[in-house]
Image (tube, rainbow, N blue to C red):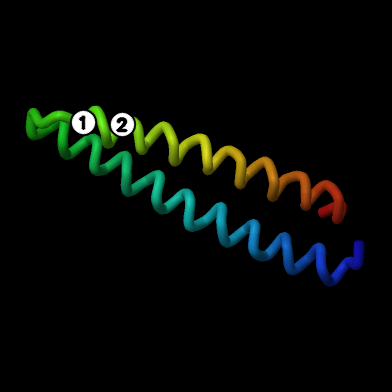
């Protein structure tokens, strides 16, 4: 695959990792706030786990691209 295409894909992957990390951090704060207030956090915890799984996939994909490009 063309190096330019790979670099563009890597840029998008980096962006997804950053945005996913922000969502994950925000969801952690939501869970903490709910629990601190004595409210039910079951759904929010589910989302937190889901966001964590998505984040891990984005990181793995980004890392594979980095390895392929040899960064």
**Mark 1: few/some/many CA within 10 Å (<14, 14-19, 20+):** some
Q: Are marks 1 and 2 in contact (CB under 8 Å)?
A: yes
Residue drawn at 72 percent across, 45 percent down: 63
Residue drawn at 91 percent across, 67 percent down: 2
**Residue on which the image places disc 2:** 45
Residue 49 located left or right of residue 13 = left
Q: Position of residue 32 (x, y in %)?
A: 22, 35
**Mark 2: few/some/many CA within 10 Å (<14, 14-19, 20+):** some
Q: Position of residue 4 (x, y in %)?
A: 84, 71
Quadrant of the image occupied by residue 12: bottom right
**Residue on which the image places disc 1:** 41
Q: Position of residue 31 (x, y in %)?
A: 24, 36
Residue drawn at 15 percent across, 36 percent down: 34
Give residue 60's mark.
Answer: none
Residue 32 located left or right of residue 20 = left
Quadrant location of the N terminus in the rendered image: bottom right
Residue 24 located left or right of residue 41 = right
Secondary structure under tag 2 reads helix
Q: Nearer the viewer, residue 46 or 14?
A: 46
């Amino acid at each position: 695959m063309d190096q330019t295409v790979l670099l563009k894909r890597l840029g998008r992957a980096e962006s997804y990792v950053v945005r996913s990390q922000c969502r994950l951090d925000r969801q952690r704060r939501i869970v903490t706030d709910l629990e601190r207030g004595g409210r039910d956090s079951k759904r929010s915890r589910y989302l937190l786990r889901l966001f964590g799984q998505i984040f891990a996939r984005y990181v793995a994909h980004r890392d594979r691209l980095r390895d392929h490009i040899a960064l």
